[in-house]
Amino acid sequence: MDDLFRVPVLGWRFGLDAVIGLIPGFGDTASSLVSFYILVNAVRYRVPKITLLRMGLIYALDYAIGSLPVVGDLFDAWWKSNQRNLDLLRKRATVSADEASAGSASDWLFVGGIIAVLIGLAVASIFISVYLAYRLLEFLGGS
């Protein structure tokens, strides 16, 4: 999601996250939903809760700033939230890949809460966007 494409001369890499983010209203939400897979796997690898929270905050920041037109797309290409969280997962995993079958119930509830907050952020941003579009159309219509 973060390093699929390479700019030939510069060596700069960007991924599908930045490309999908170009689709207004859909791109950032879709890429965030795909990113939850890393967060869910962090539970399976028994990553500490503070690291799970940090991973959730990385995604929240990515979604909040990534939703801004143009600036957000550049931020997505630079920030690389999935790569950051994969690095955290590799550093903080407390079990091997063979042992990573399930996390504790409290870990699942914790991550479920993080995902619920992130989905709430997405829903709130959609409502705010619709409201602002309505107000703009109302202003332009002169009523």
Image: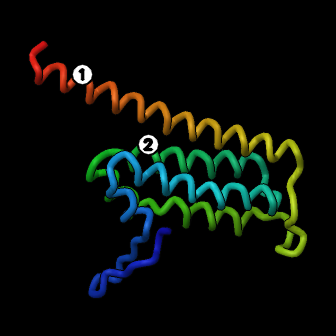
Q: Looking at the picture, does residue 4 appear above or below residue 18?
A: below
- Which residue is at a point 47% across and 49% down the rendered structure image? 29
On residue 135, the disc is: 1
Residue 37 or 47: which is nearer the viewer?
A: 37
Q: CA distance from mark 1 to mark 2?
A: 21 Å
On residue 64, the disc is: 2
32 vs 70, left or right, is right
Disc number lying in front (1 or 2): 1
**Within 10 Å of the Cα at label 1, are there few (<14), some (14-19), or many (20+) other Cα atoms?**
few
User: Which kind of residue does numbered mark 2 sit on?
Assistant: Ala
User: Which kind of residue does numbered mark 1 sit on?
Assistant: Arg
**Within 10 Å of the Cα at label 2, are there few (<14), some (14-19), or many (20+) other Cα atoms?**
some
- Which residue is at a point 70% across and 51% down the rendered structure image? 51
The outermost residue toward the top is 143
118 vs 73, left or right, is right
Residue 26 or 1: which is nearer the viewer?
A: 26
Q: Position of residue 104 (x, y in %)?
A: 89, 49
Residue 64 or 92: which is nearer the viewer?
A: 64
Q: Secondary structure at mark 1?
A: helix
On residue 5, the disc is: none
Q: Of the residues under marks 1 and 2, which one precedes in the sequence? A: 2
Rendered-image quadrant of the C terminus: top left
- Which residue is at a point 63% across and 52% down the rendered structure image? 55
62 vs 10, left or right, is right
The outermost residue toward the bottom is 9
Q: Position of residue 33 (x, y in %)?
A: 56, 53
